[in-house]
Amino acid sequence: MSGDDTTHPALALDETVHQRFRLGIMAVLAETAECSFTTLRDQLQLSDGNLSRHLRVLEEAGLVEIRKGYEGRKPCTWLKLTRQGAAALRQEIAALEQLVARMRATDPLR
């Protein structure tokens, strides 16, 4: 590694977003305008309780919006990424891309 004083790209990773299930939640929500709790749960193979805990963290950070209502007579929860959440996801992906580029540039097995 060179002696320059640039920071390592890993420092740009956001701990709230980077956790694998939260990153997965945000990635799924980025693919659609709105997603149901059950669809998200099934896609990420999470339990209701585990998904709820991760959603609470993301909601408290202002990254996800949760809307409860009914589909017919059945209760339903819809989720969507906020503008702040979309920006945070873009920043996380940019940091990951920088990290990957750095690793490729310094790969001793090339």
Image (spheres, rainbow, N blue to C red):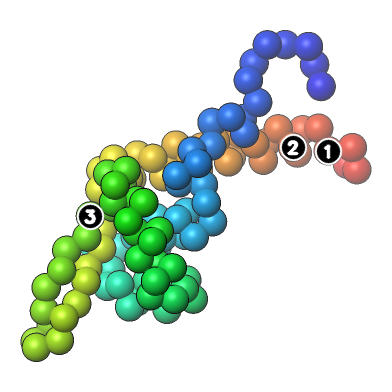
Whether tag 1 and tag 2 are in contact, CB under 8 A, the answer is: yes
Q: Residue at coordinates 25% horizontally, 63% vertically from top-left?
A: 79
Crowding at mark 1 (Cα within 10 Å: few <14, some 14-19, many 20+)? few
Disc 2 on helix, strand or loop? Answer: helix
Amino acid type at image mark 3? Glu
Label number found at residue 35? none
Place of residue 1 in the rendered image (x, y in percent of width and height, measured from the top left): 81, 22
Up the image or down, 96 lies above or below 3; here it is below
Distance of mark 2 from mark 3, alpha carbons? Answer: 35 Å
In this rendering, position of residue 89 left or right of residue 83: right
Place of residue 46 in the rendered image (x, y in percent of width and height, measured from the top left): 47, 73
Residue assigned mark 2: 103
In this rendering, position of residue 19 left or right of residue 25: right
Place of residue 7 in the rendered image (x, y in percent of width and height, measured from the top left): 63, 20
Q: Is residue 30 visible?
A: no
Whether tag 1 and tag 3 are in contact, CB under 8 A, the answer is: no
Up the image or down, 21 lies above or below 69; here it is above
Disc 1 on helix, strand or loop? Answer: loop
Residue assigned mark 1: 107
Residue assigned mark 3: 65
In this rendering, position of residue 21 left or right of residue 57: right
Amino acid type at image mark 2? Met
Disc 3 on helix, strand or loop? Answer: strand
Crowding at mark 3 (Cα within 10 Å: few <14, some 14-19, many 20+)? some
Place of residue 43 in the rendered image (x, y in percent of width and height, measured from the top left): 44, 74
In this rendering, position of residue 14 left or right of residue 88: right
Distance of mark 1 from mark 3, alpha carbons? Answer: 40 Å
Mark 2 vs mark 3: which is more N-terminal? Answer: 3
Amino acid type at image mark 1? Asp
Q: Which one is nearer the viewer's eye here, 55 or 36?
A: 55
